[in-house]
Image: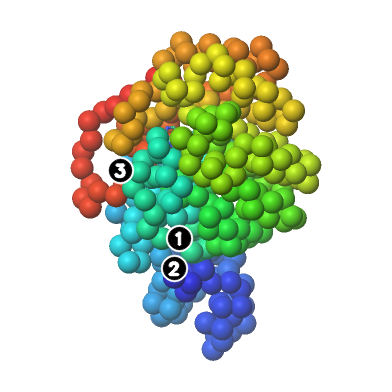
Amino acid sequence: MPDRTRYDLDRDDWSTLLAAEPRFRLEQIWNGLYHQGRDLSQLSNVPSGLRDRLDVDAPLALTLVTESVTDGGDTVKFLWELEGGARVETVLMHYADRSTVCVSTQAGCAMACSFCATGQAGFERHLSTGEIVEQLARARSRAAEGPTPRRVSNIVFMGMGEPLANYDATWAAVRRMHTDMEIGARHLTMSTVGLVPGIDRMAAENLPVGLAVSLHAADDELRDELVPINRRYPLEVLMASCERYVEATKRRLSFEWAMIDGVNDRFVDAERLADLARPLRAHVNLIPLNPTPGYAVRGSSGNRVRAFRSELEHRGVNVTVRDTRGTEIDAACGQLRAGHEATPVQRPRRRTPS
Ligand code: SAH
């Protein structure tokens, strides 16, 4: 993984790079890139000769391959190529009250969740801190463009990869986003398959970000199948770690639940899920399963999702049904594999019930 790209460099690195320049340059560039969220090319107060040198000495990490827009302009998916040729995606979503960026932390993923397109593709490599931070920087400038500029307020670590399997780079990115890009801890959400050592490390950090656990099953037998890492960190161990996280950070926990027809959408699943969620006061996010090439089972019907939701609510659990943003451009949860195609192709329109 590279460590010298533009957003990998910390202040000291920049200070070294700018050693021959007047002192104020460091502040000018750091502020421009981070606090003002501008590209180097837009920093017109920096001499163009210096900008040219920095383009070489502090190169960008992400090369845009394609940008797809859907939902009337409210969802933008970026497909990037990284050094070495791996590809990852970032999704920018505008809502009435906020704009959210969904970032990737690895090219591919080693967790092998059966229903997830990234998991089906396998692991390529970790992303560096700079490669993660740059996704936000680039999405943020894109959001600020156009007739209705928007400010990115929320970040979710729900793109490709398992963030806690790339802990150091991911956490350094979280810190940079929080400290230098003005994203409050409450507006950062880490999503994980449930790597217990990583959750415990997060609990010990002094930055209480939101935690989303991709549960999908509330009994070990089914979870072993859907989320294989469950064999290493079974539910009892995972729930104890979630409890420690909530205790240490006082942050709300959420459980992600992709609704899979006849697999995890039965009455008994709602009952077991409620039993796990209630004591932790966890919020449940139901995500209608997005179809992926390697998993033949369908998502639950709209009726089934509604019934499951009522069952949980009846048992005192807070539930939301996540909308399937970006489905048409394969930007929905677990679908980002489309980005692995060497050349962008026009895909048939697909819809899932939302
Ligand atoms: N590895 C992390 C973050 C990336 S996935 C994690 O597992 O949490 C983000 C979310 O999308 C996870 O909850 C994941 O389980 C879910 N997801 C993956 N594939 C999906 C699919 N085909 N349909 C719906 N949700 C999916």
Can the viewer see residue 325? yes
CA separation in Å, label 2 and label 1: 7 Å
Amino acid identity at mark 3: Ala
Q: Does dot 3 land on a helix, a strand or a loop?
A: helix
Image side of residue 84 versus residue 129, left or right: left
Q: Does dot 1 land on a helix, a strand or a loop?
A: strand
Looking at the rendering, which quadrant does residue 219 occupy?
top right
Comparing 143 with 319, the one in front is 319
Give the residue at x 41% y 71%.
59
Comparing 31 with 252, the one in front is 252
Amino acid identity at mark 2: Met
Q: Tell me, what colour scheme is on the image?
A: rainbow
- In primary-sequence order, the first of circles 2 and 1 is 2
- In primary-sequence order, the first of circles 1 and 3 is 1
Beta carbon at label 2 within 8 Å of ligand 1:
no
Is there CB contact under 8 Å for labels 2 and 1?
yes
Comparing 345 with 44, the one in front is 345
The label shown at residue 1 is 2
Give the residue at x 37% y 51%.
122
Question: What residue is pinned by disc 1?
Answer: 126
Amino acid identity at mark 1: His
CA separation in Å, label 1 and label 3: 19 Å
Question: What residue is pinned by disc 3?
Answer: 338
CA separation in Å, label 2 and label 3: 23 Å
